[in-house]
Amino acid sequence: MTDTPGWAPPSSSEQPGEEGRPPAGAPTVPGQSSPHGSTPPPWGGGYGGPPPGGPKPWGGAPGGQPWGGQPWGGQPGGWPQSPKPGVIPLRPLGVGEILDGAFSTVRRHWRTTLGISLGLAVLQQTIVVLIQWQSYQNPDSVLPVVSALVSVPLTLLIGVVATALLTMVVSRAILGRAVTVGEAWRDARPRVLQLLGLTLLNALIMLGIVLVAAAPLIGYLIASRPDPNPGLVVLLAVVVVAGVLAAGWITVQLSLAAPALMLEKQGIRAAFSRSRRLVRGSWWRVFGISALGSVLVSIIAGIIEMPFSIVGVVMAGDELFGDSLTTGLDPALPPAALVVIAVGGVIGGTITIPAGAAINVLIYVDQRIRREALDIELTRAAGLAEPGPVEPAGPAGPTDGGDPAAARL
């Protein structure tokens, strides 16, 4: 077993489906069917027949011991419950389980997750407030524009750090293990620069696709002024829409590259390739869960920030409405109103930043469970026993399906 059990990529070539499942008759983990979706074994250890001594009540084995050290869940057909050492059950996940697991991570490990996101949210909102304050003080100066452009790479860097740290936190939360901010940073630090490069390259790919699609329309509008052909404009606009759709499609294809890079310790190119393989055949599922998670996170952030925005607008009073009816980024907002709105942004970001990162990591984990039986490796890494009749401990100790000390995620 490697020093990072469960996260290393499979040594054999990946194929969608159930090729990663253990062969028939091989030991499995609690709650693991062979394969998923097929008829589950009726009894632990026997596979195909009742337990020794005839049928037993649910949760009972000879001597009153639970089979394999794990109680039966009492599910229809005698299915054992899937092990759940942390925030998710170790089996293929439903949409609700992914979303619930993301917010459970924030709730159970709030000291670490909120500590990380609070610091990043404060830094991000401070940059925004400084830019808006400069706009308020110098409405006719180009300095606010320059400051806004400078804030783009800083905001990108903040997002990279958040993704790196929170990916490590979620990976421990899946196994039910806590991690401090210092431990998360120590584990993530060697990969931060690569993650930054991956994020920049990903953004450039998307931007390049859109610009290539929009270049003919922009060039034609410039060359044909002041009387462009409406039919040709519509045709070129369709090309732009196609380019945007293509960029969106590729964005989903590459959406799992960040957790692959952080957890599997791969390079940028290998992480992109890994993401494409994991998403292949499941594009709509990955897109749907990601979109639903983004909408949910945005709604929660909006609900949190709305009262602060209202208070900021009231504080601005006539100064705001005398210039325009816009809010939020309006340069006419006085500093006090900007601070109030920024406080709302900090609180909203503190809660939603870790939830958004956790959703992406859990989608990655779900895809690997479905394709590579990652749940088996994670169950062993969590130190949970495999199913089977309980045997008396011999001189070497009881049989154990996983070694907690071996897990160094």
Image (cartoon, rainbow, N blue to C red):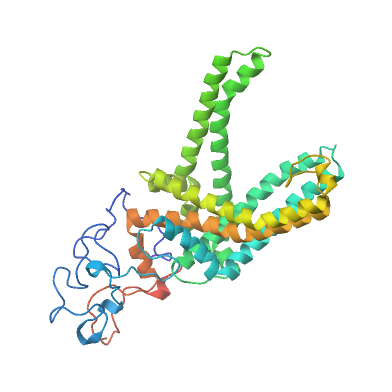
Point 24% across, 61% down: residue: 34
222 sits to left or right of 260: right
Image coords of residue 131 (percent x, y): 77, 47
Point 38% across, 53% down: residue: 367
* Occupied quadrant, residue 374: bottom left
94 sits to left or right of 215: left
Image coords of residue 205 (percent x, y): 54, 37
67 sits to left or right of 332: left
Image coords of residue 201 (percent x, y): 55, 42
Point 47% across, 62% down: residue: 100
Q: Is residue 263 above or below residue 215?
A: below
Point 52% across, 72% down: residue: 178
- The quarter of the rendered structure image containing the N terminus is bottom left
Can residue 33 be seen by looking at this rendering? yes
Image coords of residue 103 (percent x, y): 52, 63
Q: Nearer the viewer, residue 252 or 95?
A: 95
Q: Nearer the viewer, residue 12 or 315?
A: 315
Q: Nearer the viewer, residue 84 or 182?
A: 84
103 sits to left or right of 31: right
Total marks shown come to: 0
Q: Is residue 107 above or below residue 254?
A: below
Q: Nearer the viewer, residue 298 or 52?
A: 298
* Occupied quadrant, residue 347: bottom right
